[in-house]
Image: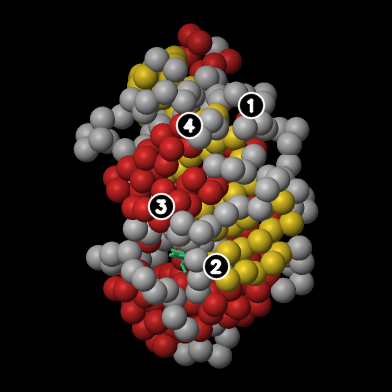
Amino acid sequence: MHEELRAALAGLLDGLPPTRAAQAVDRLISNYRGRTPTDAPVLRDRADVAAYAAYRMPATFEAVRAALAAFAARVPDWSPATHLDIGGGTGAATWATAATWDGPRSTVLDWAQPALDLGRELADGILPDTRWQRGTIGDGLTVPPGTDLVTVSYVLGELRPEDRRAVVAAAATARAVVLIEPGTPDGYLRIREARTQLTEAGLRIVAPCPHGDTCPIVPGEDWCHFAARVSRSSLHRQVKGGSLPYEDEKFSYVAATTLDAAPAPARVTRKPQLRKGQVLLDLCTTDGLDRTTVTKRHGTDYRRARDTTWGDPWPPQP
Ligand SMILES: C[S@@+](CC[C@H](N)C(=O)[O-])C[C@H]1O[C@@H](n2cnc3c(N)ncnc32)[C@H](O)[C@@H]1O
């Protein structure tokens, strides 16, 4: 899926001089930077959307894929038959859903027609079970009864507070909800607020948190976030400079469900620190935040700790 998405995105910029593509991305970044929620779509035309897709889709795809993988590990015998991707834009979360489970019927809902048109074009022949539907997030938003999965990825930050509440309330009527935001302090706070709304609506939090109680992080002191590795395209390197072939997309997320599922006992909340003969793990546990040191004396656990990465459950799940 990853390769198919890359190939589709590469085709998008065919024939567009590299400087034109870089200019479009620059314009988009300055549009998004310092933005406040608007009453009109930011992605106004094909150039905006092509720039967004080429520049951001690989990263949002990887972030959503990581969040969905963490959720899927909590419900190993379940897969969604129906999926609604709200504010789905060019469809990154729908690609990630198709990469996680076989054959869900997805609907991508967005108010920006150029984003839906380009998303349909990219997915042509690869995601055949996908509908592209124009719709606005707000009080009137409803999720069709019986929907299995709702994703809302990199959208909450574009919404006014009342629309944010409306989209989370609508999403909470599905069997499973996965919300993803940038891994910034503000993105985390939006996820934290939505998490409370989901538990109040009766859903169970199953990832990344080991429980559905109040998050133990003190706002302003830290923020819960994870990282997904993204290989950089030539456009990326051109716009951002540097020569690294990859970068880490930071994201915050929450997954909640009405299914019979339990969270992991604990989760690794930072990059594990490898020292000589020991591994330091920062964990979120049912008793709050904790740091544990796993040494060679712990045998199998030590070997497992060395293979554990940021965002994994601890202890590793079978
Ligand atoms: C940053 S993009 C994220 C797109 C996609 N979910 C992803 O992860 O790549 C935000 C999307 O939210 C859509 N959006 C923002 N406000 C909206 C609203 N009020 N109603 C419907 N869609 C909205 C935008 O058009 C855009 O496609």
**Quarter of the picture holding the C terminus:** top right
Q: Can you give x and y, in whole percent of width and height, for residue 164 in the image?
A: 40, 52
Q: Amino acid at mark 4?
A: Thr
In the picture, residue 127 is in which quadrant? Answer: bottom right
Q: Amino acid at mark 1?
A: Ala
Q: Which residue is at a point 68% across and 48% down the rendered structure image?
A: 145
Q: Which residue is at a point 42% across and 88% down the rendered structure image?
A: 20
Task: Look at the image and tell me whether residue 277 can be seen.
Answer: no
Q: Amino acid at mark 3?
A: Arg
Figure check: 31 above or below 294: below
Residue at the limit of the structure toward the front, as seen here: 140
Q: CA distance from mark 1 to mark 4?
A: 14 Å
- Among numbered discs 3 and 2, the one appearing first in the sequence: 2
Relative side of 38 to 121, left or right? left
Q: CA distance from mark 1 to mark 3?
A: 26 Å
Q: Residues within 10 Å of mark 3 (few under 14, many from 20)?
A: many
What residue did someone put label 1 on? 261
Q: Residues within 10 Å of mark 2 (few under 14, many from 20)?
A: some
Figure check: 189 above or below 290: below
Relative side of 128 to 274, left or right? right
- Among numbered discs 2 and 4, the one appearing first in the sequence: 2
Q: CA distance from mark 2 to mark 1?
A: 32 Å
Q: Is mark 2 within 8 Å of ligand 1?
A: yes
Q: Can you give x and y, in whole percent of width and height, for residue 55 in the image?
A: 46, 70
What residue did someone put label 3 on? 164
Residue at the limit of the structure toward the top, as seen here: 297
In the picture, residue 48 is in which quadrant? Answer: bottom left
Figure check: 60 above or below 315: below
- Among numbered discs 1 and 4, the one appearing first in the sequence: 4
Determine whether the residue tagged by mark 3 lies in a helix, strand or loop: helix
Relative side of 2 to 220, left or right? right
Q: How is the image coloured?
A: secondary structure
